[in-house]
């Protein structure tokens, strides 16, 4: 049984008098333990799709099931339970709470878990150490660099030991080496705990590590494949970021 199953997802946004079709009939099934990257140019619908899978936003059409459970009819409290028990979300814009310290931010989603305050604190500190931020636990988000904030957001998602991690461009603000370290940490968690990872990304490092790539174009899935079998004239040609890097990188591999 897939851990995430989306069927016929539609999401329209009203922008003034025009309607933006952010998702048009998107179906995607993700197995437990998958390490999947959603790629596509800016505005193609990646964040919208992750928000649907993460029960943060509801579709205008179609269904999302998490672990076999359809989320369509659930109350907002039940949805919050599904999110907090099963899903770790790394937001593109971090969404850290400014008045809380780094460690308190990581602890926050653990409040919905049955843990003592000591267990919560220990779990949060351990997660911060995993992303090499054990030393800045007391700092507030505005006292951290962009890359450090991104890593706090990653620690917050991992601290709940989720079945599914949804990571919206998690390496976008990290230097090459830190990005690679974080990705290898995620891959290790994926292999050891069987955690499912779904990324949205423009980063070739993520694409290379992903076991499966799904390409969105203007709200529709156009291609499913792997990086090495990717079609450079089609799928890659319009990836707006790092395009030269991506193509250089491809020719370095036995393509
Ligand atoms: N809250 C909103 N209101 C109106 N339009 C929106 C809203 N959120 C997204 N959109 C539109 O929906 C489309 C898909 O946006 P989305 O954020 O999913 O793209 P994306 O693939 O994540 O892009 P990026 O790579 O820049 O993060 C875009 O045209 C965007 O302008
Ligand atoms: Mg996005």
Image (cartoon, helix red, strand yellow):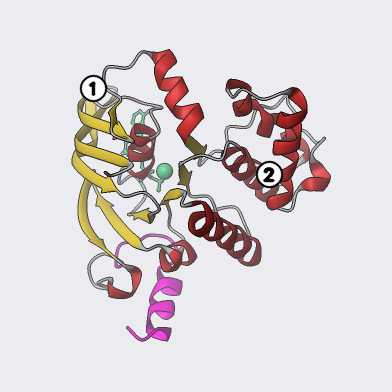
Above-or-below relation of 25 to 117: below
Foreground pick, 44 / 198: 198
Above-or-below relation of 241 to 131: below
List x then y, in percent, for residue 21.
22, 35
Where is mark 1, residue-wise? 17
Left or right placement of residue 199 versus residue 162 in this view: left
Q: Quadrant of ligand 1?
A: top left
Q: Secondary structure at mark 1?
A: loop
> Badge 1, how many Cα within 10 Å: few under 14, some, many 20+?
few
Left or right placement of residue 138 versus residue 204 in this view: right
Check the picture and name the quadrant holding the C terminus: bottom left
Check the picture and name the quadrant holding the N terminus: top left
Specify whether residue 217 is painted magenta.
no
> Badge 2, how many Cα within 10 Å: few under 14, some, many 20+?
many
Residue positioned 36% across, 13% down in the render: 75
List x then y, in percent, for residue 248.
42, 80
Q: Earlier in the sequence, mark 2 or mark 1?
A: 1
Quarter of the image holding residue 99?
top right
Quick check: marks 2 and 1 in contact, CB under 8 Å? Answer: no
List x then y, in percent, for residue 199.
43, 50
Question: Nearer the observer, disc 2 or disc 1?
Answer: 2
Specify whether residue 238 is painted magenta.
yes
Where is mark 2, residue-wise? 127
Magenta range: 236-255
Identify the disc placed on residue 211. Answer: none
Foreground pick, 32 / 21: 32
Alpha carbons under labels 2 and 1: distance apart = 45 Å
Q: Secondary structure at mark 2?
A: helix
List x then y, in percent, for residue 34.
38, 54
Residue positioned 22% across, 27% down in the render: 18
Query: Mark 1 CB in 8 Å range of ligand 1?
Result: no
Quarter of the image holding residue 69?
top left
């Amino acid at each position: 049984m897939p851990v995430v199953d989306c069927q016929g997802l539609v999401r329209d946004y009203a922008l003034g008098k025009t309607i933006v079709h952010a998702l048009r009939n998107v179906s995607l099934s993700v197995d437990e333990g998958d390490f999947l990257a959603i790629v596509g140019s800016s505005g193609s619908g990646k964040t919208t799709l992750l928000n649907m899978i993460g029960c943060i936003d509801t579709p205008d059409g179609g269904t999302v099931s998490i672990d076999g459970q359809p989320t369509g009819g659930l109350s907002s409290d039940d949805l919050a339970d599904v999110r907090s028990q099963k899903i770790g979300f790394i937001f593109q814009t971090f969404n850290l709470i400014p008045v809380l310290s780094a460690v308190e931010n990581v602890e926050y989603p653990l409040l919905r878990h049955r843990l003592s305050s000591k267990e919560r604190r220990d779990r949060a500190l351990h997660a911060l150490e995993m992303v090499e931020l054990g030393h800045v636990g007391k700092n507030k988000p505005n006292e951290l660099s962009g890359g450090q904030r991104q890593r706090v957001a990653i620690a917050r998602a991992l601290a709940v030991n989720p079945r599914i991690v949804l990571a919206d461009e998690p390496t976008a603000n990290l230097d090459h080496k830190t990005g690679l370290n974080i990705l290898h940490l995620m891959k290790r968690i994926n292999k050891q705990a069987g955690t499912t990872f779904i990324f949205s990304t423009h980063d070739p490092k993520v694409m290379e590590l992903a076991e499966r790539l799904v390409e969105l174009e203007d709200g529709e899935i156009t291609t499913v494949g792997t990086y090495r079998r990717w079609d450079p004239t089609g799928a890659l040609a319009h990836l707006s970021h790092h395009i030269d890097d991506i193509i250089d990188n491809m020719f370095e591999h036995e393509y």
